């Protein structure tokens, strides 16, 4: 069970906003208690119509706090803020995120947040259009800059009938984040260069050769590296997952463009992570006009190999810590270890197509030149990224002055 220094359980105050995901909060409270946490809940006026207070009271084992029931308080907002170790705002609506960013204290939850001196975690949930708006992105950046742990959103079907980014993370992923504690500044003053997402090779002005990489792992690595104090640069292919605020983004399309961007930024990096899915081949001479379908339906493409970017980086790493990824059909540490040696990597992260490609979770095996493989069970990619970077920091001695 998670414990404080004086051996008491972790105290989590869940601030529930009026997003549709509020109905999941009894499950969240139950899951936190199963992990040994003490849980109290505070609900906004709009949240009260979406989640039953009796359910929250039952699963948390404590009274439910709100603006409309002051007689139910056993302490005022200052004492409630002093009770908690963690304030988890979940689901966090765009409205509440804006209030937190601008220091507005117009209800119990926002007043608690303004007076709270411990760790704050924000789990957003909203419509995709609201999540993408510049105002929301700027508000999230403000919270990030203040050291508030803003969790990523999930991608999928939304209550409004659309599909896209904006879903609240699964309950188990949020619980993992609460229990993980504040991210230590293991990479303070370090520079991390990350390659992320797919590359795209043109066949003609319409058709391309590409792959199904989402760039979610690269984005997760960027977010965690930044949270650990690093200055992060990400070279990212088309259609990749959005990157966190404060991270330098260099967009590219083809493998050769990615190689050039990595080469240009390589010398100033301390740690280089090759998490991109590079197209192994390109069309030798892409057509300038759209290729016409032949009556026979048959077509032949004249392909040539793209440069092996990871091997090229390995040849010139000169003291940099180089991390490669090995995507396999099945878990084969022998092949991954051979790749690590051949590419001169300091660490190889092996994952499988089924467990990783295009998903929000992953399970990986981390290999180093010496020592046994470290198997990391299935978790959300942000948690996986933290596991990887923690090991990178330890192995590289990455406290750069």
Image (cartoon, helix red, strand yellow):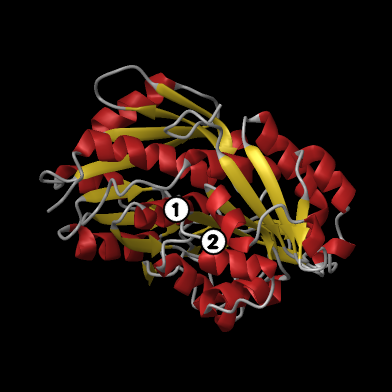
Badge 2 element = loop
| 377 over 202 or under it: above or below | above
Q: Which residue is mark 2?
A: 241
Disc 1: CA contacts within 10 A as few (<14), some (14-19) or many (>=20): many
- Residue lying at the far bottom in this picture: please name it: 135
Q: Residue at x 29, y 18 (%)?
A: 371
* Residue 345 in view here: no
102 and 223: which one is in front?
A: 102
Asked whether the residues under the numbered discs 2 and 1 touch, taking CB atoms below 8 Å apart as contact, a structural biologist would say: yes
Q: Residue at x 19, y 51 (%)?
A: 270
Q: Residue at x 35, y 48 (%)?
A: 274
Q: CA distance from mark 2 to mark 1?
A: 8 Å
371 and 215: which one is in front?
A: 371
| 201 over 326 or under it: above or below | below
The quadrant in which residue 154 appears is bottom right
Direction from residue 197 to residue 229 in the image, left or right: left
* Residue 224 in view here: yes
Q: Earlier in the sequence, mark 2 or mark 1?
A: 1
Q: Which residue is mark 1?
A: 218
Give the percent coordinates (x, y) of residue 166. Answer: 68, 64
Direction from residue 334 to residue 16 in the image, left or right: right
85 and 384: which one is in front?
A: 85
Q: Residue at x 53, y 31 (%)?
A: 8
């Amino acid at each position: 069970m998670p414990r404080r220094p004086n051996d008491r359980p972790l105290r989590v105050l869940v601030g529930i906003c009026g997003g549709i995901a509020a109905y999941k909060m009894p499950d969240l409270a139950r899951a936190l208690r199963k992990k040994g946490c003490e849980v109290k809940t505070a609900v906004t006026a709009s949240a009260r119509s979406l989640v039953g207070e009796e359910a929250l009271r039952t699963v948390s084992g404590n009274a439910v706090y709100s603006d409309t029931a002051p007689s139910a308080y056993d302490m005022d907002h200052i004492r409630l803020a002093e009770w908690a170790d963690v304030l988890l705002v979940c689901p966090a609506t765009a409205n509440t995120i804006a209030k937190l960013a601008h220091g507005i204290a117009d209800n119990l939850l926002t007043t608690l947040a303004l007076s709270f001196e411990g760790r704050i975690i924000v789990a957003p949930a909203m419509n995709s259009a609201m999540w993408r708006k510049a105002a929301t992105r700027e508000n999230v950046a403000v919270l990030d800059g203040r050291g508030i742990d803003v969790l990523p959103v999930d991608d999928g079907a939304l209550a409004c009938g659309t599909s896209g980014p904006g879903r609240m993370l699964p309950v188990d992923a949020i619980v993992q984040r609460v229990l993980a504690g504040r991210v230590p500044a293991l990479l303070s003053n370090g520079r991390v260069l990350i390659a992320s997402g797919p590359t795209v090779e043109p066949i003609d002005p319409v058709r391309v050769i590409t792959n199904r990489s989402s760039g979610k792992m690269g984005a997760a690595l960027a977010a965690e590296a930044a949270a650990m104090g690093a200055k992060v640069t990400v070279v990212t292919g088309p259609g990749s997952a959005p990157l966190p605020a404060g991270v330098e983004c260099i967009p590219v399309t083809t493998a050769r463009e990615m190689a050039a961007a990595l080469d240009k930024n390589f010398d100033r990096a301390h740690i280089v992570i090759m998490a991109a899915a590079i197209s192994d081949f390109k069309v030798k001479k892409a057509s300038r006009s759209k290729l016409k379908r032949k009556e026979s339906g048959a077509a032949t493409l004249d392909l040539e190999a793209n440069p092996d970017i990871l091997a090229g980086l390995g040849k010139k790493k000169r003291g940099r810590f180089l991390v490669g990824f090995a995507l396999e059909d099945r878990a084969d540490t022998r092949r991954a270890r051979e790749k690590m040696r051949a590419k001169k990597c300091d660490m190889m992260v092996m994952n499988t197509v089924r467990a990783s490609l295009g998903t929000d979770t992953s399970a990986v095996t981390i290999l180093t030149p010496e020592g046994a493989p470290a198997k990391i069970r299935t978790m959300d990619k942000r948690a996986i990224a933290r596991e990887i970077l923690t090991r990178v920091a330890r192995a590289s001695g990455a406290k750069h002055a």
